[in-house]
Image (tube, rainbow, N blue to C red):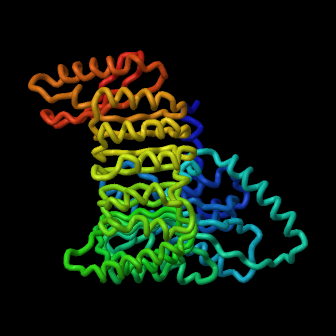
Amino acid sequence: MSTQSPHTLQKLAIQSLLRDKALAMEAVEYLPGALFPPVFMEAFTGGHTEVLKAMLLAWPFPCLPLGSLMEMRTPGSLDTQKNVHQMKERMFQAVLEGIHMLLSQKVCSRKFKLQVLDMRAVHQNFWTVCAENKLQACSSETMKRRKTRKSLPRVAKKQPLKVIVDLWIMNEWLDPVDSYLLKWVQEMENRVHLQCPKMCITGLCTERVTKILKKLNLYSVREMDVLFSWTMFSLAHFAPFLGQMRNLHKVFISHVFVPATISPEMREKLFTKITSQFRKLHCLQEIYMDSVEFLEGHLDQVLRCLKCPLETLSLRNCQLSQDDWNQLPQSEKTRQLKHLGLSCIRPTDCSPEFLRILLDNVAATLTTLHLENCGITDAQVCTFLPSLSCCSQLTTFCFIRNFISIATMKKLLDHTARLRNLSREMYSVPQEVYVPRDGTLQQTWNMVQEALREMMKPLNHPRTILFCVSHELFRQRTVYYMHPNPCPACIPI
């Protein structure tokens, strides 16, 4: 009697089936829907091109998540991994060739149910979990379509196959699979509709990059990341492509610097060229900027270019002028923020009122507040505390690397205790509590824990608070998970 698991027996049965190509090609017609994913996966990894093409014609689901299948790792040596990767690329090309043949047929086969080829690394469970539920879900949708199409002629007009892919242009180059896919899409013309929900450019905005961008339908881009040191000239050159992303919801721009030799007139000209494209982005709701130099003195102008209120505004390592700080709370585009992040930005020269007004305006909607390493003083904290207490939807509050006194910390913790939805709080240990000294690290931890425990005693609201401290002597950061009653745990990271 066999002691092998049903999963192993199924895999052995599938492998046995695929050894006989003629039998496998015939069996596809009678294969239960739940077995299509494991058989397709085995045929893909085993190099059975003809079986794959036959399965595409009978594929029972509207979507083929090929990207997640190609991302699956196979255990083995580096040489084995390299061979597996090459095999997957060859099988990917075989799949596209099969789809090409099917879409090129003049008669639309009723057996061909595939509507979406998804090249993203999502839907991993599709290949590892029984697909019966997926089949039932898409069957009900299929039955609805059949009812509405009863009166239509047998030969209906073919709908373009939707191809979904996230593109990463790294140092002017695309991944070989993505490059082959784009070439294939161009060859297919109107029979394929390409969608690119996410795009990331890591590297300079060169002529090669713009050549790639010109080939794409940028309307489908929902998230755009620029992750390299660009000058204002490069961003201005890229801006017209950004303006074509009319469905853009999220943009992340990192490390854009202004050349020291640029004239004020040219800087304003480039800034206008960039912001004029923001006016076309009617769906933009999330802005992330990290180390963007041209923002200084122009934050209000950027916000005024937007067509709808923001849900997320995250600024990190961005130099802001006093006018920027004063205008930020007044902007209509920041009145409905759900996520606000200000990190490594020091409003020390500004009135503490700006944070109070800003929190007052977003009290009904704000769920995440990050104020990290902003040099916020005791006076500024005391000013915005009443407004912070009104942020009833707040779930996450990060205040690390702002060093305030024990007295102010106690006031802060007392106010955050009133926020019933707040589940994650992060602070730096007050410097009065933590002073680096000679001695063992364990002694330092015990001293800090005891002081924090004393500070936490008056808090009755059950919650977990994270206190962070960097130990310069030992070049180590420690996180203290503190609770009002139980003993805290000390975890080095």
The reply to whether residue 165 is in sight is yes
Query: From what the image shows, is residue 95 above or below residue 369?
Result: below
24 left or right, relative to 244: right
Toward the left, the furthest residue is: 438
Q: Nearer the viewer, residue 51 or 78?
A: 78
Q: Quadrant of the C terminus?
A: top left
Toward the right, the furthest residue is: 151
Q: Nearer the viewer, residue 266 or 440?
A: 266
Which residue shows up at 18% across the image and 19% down it?
Answer: 443
Image coordinates of residue 150 in percent, x first then y, are 89, 69
Which residue shows up at 10% across the image and 23% down it?
Answer: 439
Q: Nearer the viewer, residue 332 or 14?
A: 332
The picture quadrant where one finds residue 435 is top left
The picture quadrant where one finds residue 142 is bottom right
Query: From what the image shows, is residue 92 above or below residue 314?
Result: below
202 left or right, relative to 357: left
Q: Quadrant of the N terminus?
A: top right
Which residue shows up at 47% across the image and 39% down it?
Answer: 388
Which residue shows up at 71% across the image and 68% down it?
Answer: 112
Query: From what the image shows, is residue 64 above or below residue 404?
Result: below
Image coordinates of residue 52 in percent, x first then y, are 58, 65
316 left or right, relative to 189: left
